[in-house]
Amino acid sequence: MRISLPPTPLQGISNARLPAWALPADWPQQNGEPLTADIRFDAGKISALMPSAQPQPDLHHLGGALVLPGLTEPHAHLDKTFTIGRSQPAAPGLLAAIAAMHQDRQHWSAADIHQRAARGLARAAANGVTHLRTHIDWFAPTPPLAWLEMATLTRPGITLERVALAPLGFFASAETADSIARAVAQSGKHCLLGGFIHSSNWDPLAMENLMLSAARWQLDLDLHIDEELSDSATGLVWLAEYLSRRPFPGHICCSHGCALASGSEQQAKQVLALLAEQRVTLIALPMTNLLLQDAVTGRTPRQRGLTLVKEATAAGIPLLLGCDNVQDAFCPAGSYDPLDTLACGLFAAQLDHAFDQQSRLICDVAALTGAGPGGSPFAVGNAASMVIFPDSDRFSWPLNSAARQVIHHGRLIYQRMWEQEFTYES
């Protein structure tokens, strides 16, 4: 299908196939799937959403093409990205990747960080991402160069968030914990406190200091927690029990959570129930975790390296999928295309209804920020920002979906199309 959109502001689009999760509950269906939609724009915002009926000659006809709201990248590492050419880990697994990253830090000048991070942000924007959260490693209790450099990074169409990724040991001192939290809070809007929490550095006192300092400085949290396949990892267990006694005033995201798949079913059920009560969001990172978990040279992995995606959803926990690392020691491949992440997650977690249900895993910015479930992302008054997949169908999507058109505030800003159809002769 060839759909030509002008660079001038659009009046809207017609005959667009939207995902079921993003439509009002009373949206009409035919043969078990939602009717296509007409969406009108005004001054860069959505002014009307209605089922397609009569032809709308002033709108751009999509012929039933798939359309999503702007994509969300909930977990990236722009400070490390595109370093694989000079940062090869000596062995498989997470800890070897960390060691390789530390060796590469000798190259991390302001110019190097800015060039690599800007490249990653540009790729994400061209793929339709409108909200990206990057974790930035802190190697001391004071803000690193990458934290400061990333504050200067902007890209039209993308909201960029920064998370201070500090080792849990930095929070062993209440004074140091407060100093880190204060520095993050004073860094401006879209900054969060994080922490690397692993059985190799576990310290319950440091965890409590981390939680208290975040609350004191009114910071949301995004934690690298239990990134391991170990039934002895206690990060999420401790957090769930802590929150049951002392609810956190802000929003919490827990990234990774691989250890949930290694403990008992009963323990996982209890932890997920407690996290659900506090509306904690779980972020799964299928690509990098499949590469790093249960990784041994010359041996096929026996475990998936993925958190309990289906169980978390069943428990009512907001869930997202993120790319994590892109072309660095942690993940030599990867991309800033959430469709690649989703495709990996669909197969790894055996998820179905990819477009109508699972596309939410790469679009739900409210789950990332804790803004609440809200209404349809296509509701009147919301930004007219969306991604059109002109060559895709809902049965094979997200595969074979590289071609796309990115609309930002009613204007076409990126376009990638197939130049020709491939034909096959028997």
Image: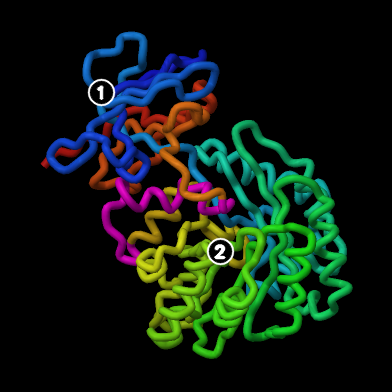
Q: Against 238, is 247 above or below? A: above
Outermost top residue: 57
| Secondary element at tag 2 | loop
Does residue 334 appear to the left or right of 221 in the view shown? left
- The residue to which callout 2 is attached is 331
Which amino acid, mark 1? Answer: Ser
Q: Against 307, is 387 above or below? A: above
Asked whether residue 198 appears in the rendered view, the answer is yes
Residue 53 location, quadrant? top left
Q: Which residue is drawn at 84% across and 76% down?
A: 174
Mark 2 neighbour density, 10 Å: few (under 14) some (14–19) many (20 or more)? many
Q: Residue at x 50, y 30 (%)?
A: 382
Q: Which colour scheme is used?
A: rainbow
Residue 217 location, quadrant? bottom right
**Measured from the top left, where is residue 305 in percent x and y?**
45, 75
**Toward the viewer: 250 or 43?**
250
Residue 227 location, quadrant? bottom right
Q: Against 133, is 129 above or below? A: above
**Toward the viewer: 330 or 218?**
218
Q: How far apart are marks 2 and 1 (CA)?
A: 43 Å
**Measured from the top left, where is residue 318 in percent x and y?**
46, 59
**Measured from the top left, where is residue 59 in percent x and y?**
36, 14
| Secondary element at tag 1 | loop
Q: Is residue 363 magenta?
A: yes
Q: What stretch is highlighted in magenta?
A: 347-370
**Measured from the top left, where is residue 317 in percent x and y?**
45, 63
Which amino acid, mark 2? Answer: Cys
Q: Which of marks 2 and 1 is in front?
A: 1
Q: Residue at x 54, y 17 (%)?
A: 43
- The residue to which callout 1 is attached is 52
Q: Does the magenta stretch include residue 42?
A: no
